[in-house]
Image (cartoon, grey):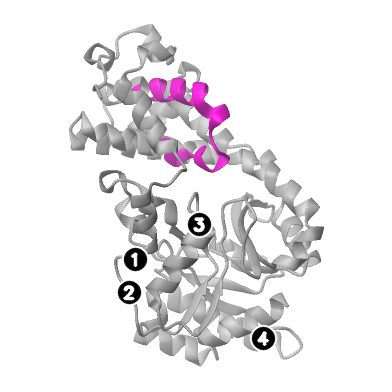
Amino acid sequence: MTSPRQEDDTPNSARAAQGDYHPDQLSEWDLAIFRQLTSTGLTPEQEARISAPAQVYPRQQEVLAIHWHPEWVPLPLAKTRVLATFPACRQALIIPTQHNELLGLDDYAGVEVDCFSLGFNRKVQLLLHFRQDRLAQATTLKSMLKHTQLYRSGQLWELTDSLWDPKFDDRLQEAAEETGANQDLVDFVRLHAGKFRCLLRDHEPKLKPIMVKNKLLSDYFAALRQHFPDKLIGRALFLIKAVKQIVKRDFSPQYFYRASEVIEEARHLGGGVVIPHPEQFWPILLADYDVDGYEVWNPQSREYTEFLITVLHRQNRQRGRQQRPLLVFMGDDTHLGEKTKPPELQDRVKVSREVGLQTAWDDPLIRKQVMLAGMDRGRVISEYQERLG
């Protein structure tokens, strides 16, 4: 495998700046790494890595996993890993929640939906869970999810264009000022974004939708560490992240259904609704949506866990016995596809997560707060299963 051609690493041509590449101008390395990053097939070695967790938790008897992403890992293999991680499991509720794609495992199915909250004018996410036997009537929901799924591929294209197309130069310059990037770094990012764009243009029709997302661009740049200094790639990724935030800020809401519409459809199918990431979407706590509970902790959102438990406890006291109590949920937000990647390409934070592992349940202070709220992991599992029917 050859490295990228050195003459292509000097961003001084209009062709490079425009990302106007042709397949024969891309190196063997470019093509090989793109194929590797977008492959969804698992080798025997990868399957063995998924089946055998690095760490086992022999004392945990209850497994609540209602916020995790199998990505391209087959669901039976994912279940094998969970059972191997918690060999003493006696009570479990394990429901996959792929982004905007309804997937089922055993008796249940789930999805994490991107939608739009009109009340405070921004995108939010909802976790929906169902019994599998209810989904024969889910035609409308599946149509809504298919439409929303276009958002991720569309945003990847807009992010890539924002890095190389001069008509979006204001975004790139805004991000450069915000991050302190100099012109050499801007040119470096623009050059390699152009190469990536060519690869995406030529191969997207053959890719599974799950692979066409913003993370693919970041993974491509991270792989460039094989040929460029780690510090340079780190700065490039920092700049790309800043541009991504601008793209998300400016992204059209036309792909999203309103949160109230998604909740209404879920309830029509007898589904459950949970608010994930309330720390990120905190105004949604004020929206009074018809939900079963809130996720008070996950690896991305854990700063206000105790506060959120207290808020839910107070809301339940105010609701009275006529209304079902809001439940305390915790999500591991595991992305299993991360565990299939070569170690040098793994996201160190994401790869450390495990389906069903939420350490906050066993934290003494948080555990006390949960008990004061009249809940524990076993009760939440039983109550939510009863609601799902």
What separation in Å lies between label 1 and label 3 (alpha carbons)?
Answer: 16 Å
Residue 336 location (% of width, % of height): 43, 56
Rendered location of residue 256, percent (x, y): 67, 45
**Reading the chain from its start, which is encountered first: label 3 or label 4?**
3
Q: Are circles 4 and 1 on residues that touch, CB within 8 Å?
A: no
Q: Position of residue 254 (x, y in %)?
A: 69, 39
Residue beneath disc 2: 56
Q: Residue at x 61, y 74 (%)?
A: 293
Q: Check disc 1 and report its element: helix, strand or loop.
A: loop
Circle 1 Cα neighbour tier, 10 Å, few/some/many (<14 / 14–19 / ≥20): some
**Relative side of 200 to 188, left or right:** right
First in residue order: circle 2 vs circle 3: 2
Q: Residue at x 39, y 65 (%)?
A: 354
Q: CA distance from mark 2 to mark 3?
A: 20 Å
Q: Secondary structure at mark 4?
A: helix
Front position among marks 4 and 1: 1
Characterize the local packing of mark 4: few (<14), some (14-19) or many (20 or more) Cα atoms within 10 angstroms: few
Amino acid marked by disc 1? Pro
The circle on residue 53 is: 1
Say if residue 279 shows up in the picture. no
Using residue 146 as the reference point, say whether residue 207 is left or right of it: left
Give the extent of the magenta segment: 192-216
Q: Quadrant of residue 81?
A: bottom left
Q: Is residue 63 above or below residue 46?
A: below
Distance between the alpha carbons at the discs numbered 3 and 4: 35 Å
Query: Disc 3 designates what residue?
Result: 69
State the SS at label 2.
loop
Between disc 4 and disc 1, whose residue precedes? Answer: 1
- Residue contact at pointers 4 and 2, CB within 8 angstroms: no
Measured along the vertical axis of the image, is residue 249 above or below residue 19?
Answer: below
